[in-house]
Image: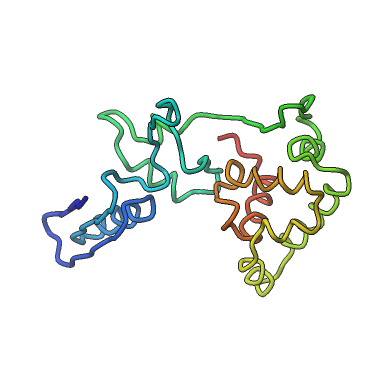
Amino acid sequence: MKSSLIPPTSRKRVAIFGAGIAGLTVAHELVRRNYEVQIFEANEDAGGFFRSARTEGDQHMPSEYSWHGFGPWYDNVFDLLKQIPFDASSSIYEKGLSRPIDFCMVPDDAAGTSTSAWFADLREIFRFTRWDEARWAWMMFRVWTANRRSQEHYAEMNASQAFRPILSDLGWRTWRACFGPWVGSDWTNVSLHQVGLFFRKELLTRPTH
């Protein structure tokens, strides 16, 4: 698939390979800056990992590469979506995303989670023991308080492998399985720094959408 976005007064030309979120965002910004942009995509449709699909294997229900969520600290994403028209009266942000959502994840056999004690939620959601909870909190504290050198070190560490030796097997497997829905990343690739950054912002901002 090839798509051209050519403003009338364009002077410079740019080729973008990949029509995922990153490629489309770059194209949008370059067109605003008066560039002629051509996007090349190997698949038939744009959107990359953020595109839903309906497949026979999923009973034609919308299926995703991963769950997608944006906390309120994604200012650039929300700003961009406010600029893209949905219809004649409003933007994609206003029609598609500007709605408050509260969600929680719990194992099937959990009795329920407490909304008043955040760490009590951790034990039920991730099947943590009290030792798991303490070790998890210590690892998060280390990441949250790291200086620049340590941040660069943690950015090179795989989060799943970093937690494996300090959590019980059940707690680790449950925690690992939640990386996609919670962090928005494939657990096999996400770094310890990214996981720490996400949960620090989750605790501090308490997002409502």
Give the farthest residue toward the front: 57
Q: Residue at 83%, 47% (x, y): give it.
A: 133
Residue at the spot 77% in from the left edge and 44% down from the top edge: 170
Q: Position of residue 203 (x, y in %)?
A: 70, 45
Closest to the observer, 161 or 9: 161
Residue 109 appears at what percent x and percent y?
Answer: 76, 27
Q: Quadrant of the C terminus?
A: top right
What colouring method underlies this structural image?
A: rainbow
x and y percentages locating residue 150 in the rendered image: 69, 71
Residue lying farthest to the right in this orientation:
130
| Residue name at image x 24 percent, y 56 percent | 39
What residue is rendered at 52% in x and 43% in y? 70
Q: Left of 105 or right of it: where is 2?
A: left
Would you say 125 lies left or right of 79 here?
right
> Residue pushed farthest left?
8
Front residue of 124/28: it is 124
Question: For the image shown, how many numbered marks are present on the structure?
Answer: 0
Above-or-below relation of 35 to 198: below
Question: Which picture quadrant has residue 177?
Answer: top right
Q: Residue furthest bottom?
A: 149
- Examine the rendered structure and indicate whether residue 95 appears above or below residue 150: above
Residue 160 percent across, percent down from the top left: 67, 56
